[in-house]
Image (cartoon, helix red, strand yellow):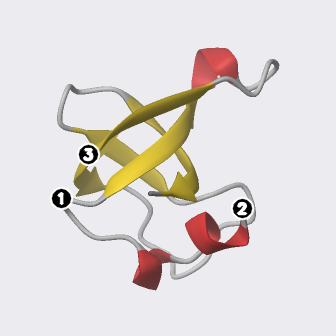
Amino acid sequence: MTEGSYRKNIHTGLEVEIVLKKDQRTGKLTKGIVKDILTNSTYHPHGIKVRLMDGQVGRVQKLN
């Protein structure tokens, strides 16, 4: 999970699994391709926030 906490590991076009805001309680992951990186800092303990190609926004949990 820590790999998704570092901005340097994430780039547009990368396939990732994110947790959406509505799924934070359950931990359900959503798979998609990164369109935009929304977190400006180099590190975030809960995962870097990204927007997927389909418009969904969440924090990166896994890199695929």
Q: Which mark is on residue 13? A: 1
Neighbours of disc 1 within 10 Å: few (<14), some (14-19), many (20+): few
Neighbours of disc 2 within 10 Å: few (<14), some (14-19), many (20+): few
Compared with 47, 44 (above or below) is below
- Please state the horizontal and vertical placement of residue 46, each as a whole percent of the image: 72, 55
Quadrant (top left, top right, bottom left, bottom right) of the C terminus: bottom left
Residue type of the residue flagged with mark 1: Gly
Identify the residue at image location x=80%, y=18%: 26
Neighbours of disc 3 within 10 Å: few (<14), some (14-19), many (20+): some
Identify the residue at image location x=41%, y=70%: 40
The residues bearing labels 2 and 3 have C-alpha atoms spaced at a distance of 17 Å
Kindly indicate whether the residue at mark 1 contacts the one at mark 3 (C-beta within 8 angstroms).
yes
Q: Nearer the viewer, residue 7 or 32?
A: 32
The residues bearing labels 3 and 1 have C-alpha atoms spaced at a distance of 6 Å
Quadrant (top left, top right, bottom left, bottom right) of the N terminus: bottom right
Q: Which callout, 2 or 1, points at the residue further toward the start of the chain?
A: 2
Q: Which mark is on residue 33? A: 3
Identify the residue at image location x=52%, y=82%: 42
Residue type of the residue flagged with mark 3: Ile
Q: Which mark is on residue 1? A: 2
Identify the residue at image location x=26%, y=45%: 33
Compared with 15, 57 (above or below) is above
Q: Which mark is on residue 62? A: none
- Please state the horizontal and vertical placement of residue 13, each as a whole percent of the image: 18, 59
